[in-house]
Image (cartoon, grey):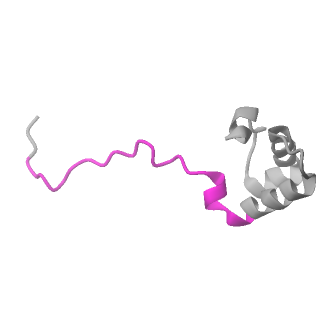
Amino acid sequence: AFIADCKDLPFNIYGTWNESLLDKDEELAQEIHIHIQGVGRYMKATNIVDFLDTPEMRNRSGLTKRISLATAQR
């Protein structure tokens, strides 16, 4: 295809909308970190899933659905 103006190229937004919730909100990351320290030595990913599923954390993070176990394991 012919491009009349080489400086006016389309912008590809693929992949730009995927940003970690922890990168956006450092206070939320800090709260999760404190919770993990409180759980102790035998921490599991299900502890994070359950912690983020509480009504307080859902309101705080803006999540509408429960996060999956695979997401918590990353």
Inspect the magenta stretch and tell me whether residue 10 lies in it: yes
Image coords of residue 67 (percent x, y): 75, 38
Residue at (91%, 52%) from the top-left corner?
40
- Quadrant containing the N terminus is top left
Residue that extends furthest to the bottom in the rendered view of this protein: 27
Number of marks in the image? 0
The span picked out in magenta is 4-27
Q: Is the stretch drawn in magenta largely helix, strand or loop?
A: loop
Most extreme residue toward the front, as rendered? 41
The image position of residue 5, as x and y in percent, is 10, 52
Q: Is residue 5 magenta?
A: yes
Which residue: 76% across, 64% down? 30
Q: Quadrant of the C terminus?
A: top right
x and y percent of residue 22 in the render? 66, 56
Say which quarter of the image contains residue 15: top left
Quadrant position of residue 8: bottom left
Percent of width and height locating residue 50: 87, 42
Along the viewing direction, whichever of 39 and 59 lies nearer the viewer: 39
Hey, which quadrant is residue 68 in on the image? top right
Q: Is residue 36 left or right of residue 9?
A: right
Front position in the image: 41 or 50:
41
61 or 26, which is in the foreground?
Answer: 26
Identify the residue at image location x=53%, y=46%.
18
